[in-house]
Amino acid sequence: MTVLTPRDYVDAASFERERQRLGAAWTPVCRADEVAGAGAQKSVVVAGVPVLVTRGQDGALHALSNVCRHRGMTLVDGEARADAIRCPYHLWAYRLDGALAAAPFMDGADLGGCDLPRYAVAEWGGWVFVSLSPQPSPLADALAPLAGALDPAALAGLKVGYRLAFEHAGTGR
């Protein structure tokens, strides 16, 4: 068992270790009904990484980098609904699965490798989970300890009734 020391709360190396662990884990980021329907887009942060959760035309969920590959701009703030993801800076467009669809004024440029990075995404009990790990363990395995205590079918029917945001120093909100 690892014991935290007071230094662990202020040490940059300790923070980075924690960020890596949290990023590799499955993190609940929103309710599935918040990204219901084709074109739904919701920005979230996982272990300090900006992530965009989208719902494709086929109903599939995607978790993508929320940073444009061209000039590093944030693609979506909050929530959006559209048939594509559009960068507000130079209007690069991506499909809802993160594939580059258009790059205005870039004729002749090699745009290979310009798709948005993709992350693991899954639904369970009406929740959307994201992992930054390239090969995370199956979500069902990660949630197995909850199986006896929580019924995913019952959870899936729940709706957000009220949201309370807390403001405190350092959040920028």
Image (cartoon, rainbow, N blue to C red):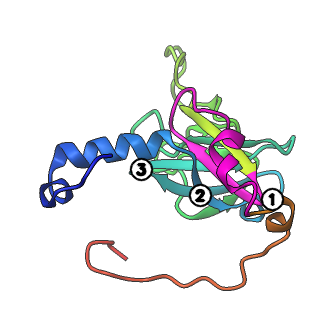
Q: Amino acid at mark 2?
A: Val
Q: Dot 3, how many residues are within 10 Å of its Cα: few (below 14), some (14-19), or many (20+)? A: some
- Quick one: 3 or 9, which is closer to the camera? 3
Q: Quadrant of residue 33?
A: bottom right
> Could you tell me which residue is drawn at 25 percent across and 49 percent down?
15
Q: Which residue is mark 2?
A: 29
The mark found on residue 17 in the picture is none
What distance separates the C-alpha of mark 3 from that of mark 1? 25 Å
Q: Which residue is mark 1?
A: 152
For the residue carrying disc 1, how many other residues have a C-alpha within 10 Å: few (<14), some (14-19), or many (20+)? some
Q: Earlier in the sequence, mark 1 or mark 2?
A: 2
Name the amino acid type tagged 1: Pro
- The mark nearer the N terminus, 2 or 3, is 2
Q: Amino acid at mark 3?
A: Ala
Q: CA distance from mark 1 to mark 2?
A: 16 Å
Work out how far the residue at label 2 is from the one at label 3, CA to CA, in angstroms: 11 Å
Nearer the viewer's eye, disc 1 or disc 2? 1
Front position in the image: 149 or 154 = 149
**Given contact means CB atoms under 8 Å apart, are the residues at marks 2 and 3 in contact?**
no
94 and 137: which is toward the camera:
137
What residue span does the magenta drawing correspond to?
124-149
The image shows residue 97, relative to residue 160, as above or below, that is above
Q: Which residue is mark 3?
A: 47
From this view, report whether residue 106 is shown above or below residue 104: above
x and y percentages locating residue 173 in the rendered image: 37, 77
Q: Are marks 1 and 2 in contact (CB under 8 Å)?
A: no
Q: Secondary structure at mark 2?
A: strand
**Residue 144 within the segment the image draws in magenta:** yes
Residue nearest the viewer, comparing 39 with 24: 24
Q: What residue is at 83 percent from the left and 56 percent from the top?
A: 37
Q: Helix or strand or loop: what does disc 3 sit on?
A: loop
